[in-house]
Amino acid sequence: MGSASSTLTQYDIEDVQEHCNNLFSQQEIVSLYQRFCQLDRTAKGFISADEFLSVPEFAMNPLSQRLLRMVDGLNFKDFVIFLSAFNPKASMPQKIELIFKVYDSDYNGKVTFNDIMEVLRDLSGSFMSDKQREEVLIKVMQEAGYSKDSSLLVDDFVKILDHPGLKMEVEVPVD
């Protein structure tokens, strides 16, 4: 499974389905596999950062460099697991965990004030100064009960972001 010349067996489909908590139907997994094989241009069984950049929507994303660190070298199963956070049926904690990973650029399991500032820089570009970003972030963190010196864990992100009124609707079409 994973190279362009191989095909998915029923066992492979069910295995992938189980690993993504049944968020994708069997037909969606087949469609994702076809897309995976298109991206895996050299049929090595994994997708490189350069291959991900061939997707225009991905390349245009202001967080693409951060996302590339997360997706570089994914095999098919990991590719589907990564995409499952974008599935409309994914739970809010699943989506928040992906967001946490985007912010946790050094993969130490903690997000610091500086980590968040880097993401804000990526997102706002020249529209905000560092001083403005810092002021906004200090205020938001204080309102959430944290300080500039706090290190946030994934559970903190869930506590802050898991609210009924908050919607995180980013979807990746599967066909």
Image (tube, rainbow, N blue to C red):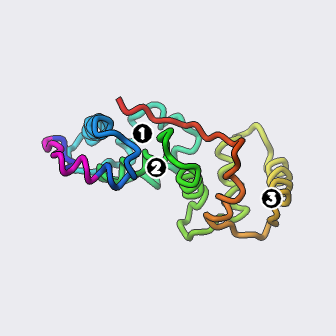
Residue range (magenta): 5-15
Q: Position of residue 90 (x, y in %)?
A: 50, 46
Amino acid type assigned to the residue bearing label 3 in the image? Ala
First in sequence: mark 1 vs mark 3: 1
Q: What's the distance in space between the residues labelled 3 and 2, CA to CA?
A: 29 Å
Q: Is residue 20 left or right of residue 141?
A: left
Q: Which residue is mark 2?
A: 68
Amino acid type assigned to the residue bearing label 1 in the image? Leu
Q: Is residue 142 left or right of residue 36?
A: right
Whether tag 2 and tag 1 are in contact, CB under 8 A, the answer is: yes
Residue 73 at least partly seen: no
Callout 1 environment at 10 Å: few (<14), some (14 to 19), or many (20+)?
some
Above or below for 135 versus 38: below
Q: Which residue is mark 3?
A: 144
Amino acid type assigned to the residue bearing label 2 in the image? Leu
Q: Which residue is mark 1?
A: 53
Q: Position of residue 95 (x, y in %)?
A: 55, 49
First in sequence: mark 2 vs mark 1: 1
Residue occupying image coordinates x 18% and y 46%: 10
Instruction: Confirm whether the magenta stretch covers residue 87.
Output: no
Q: Is residue 5 left or right of residue 150?
A: left
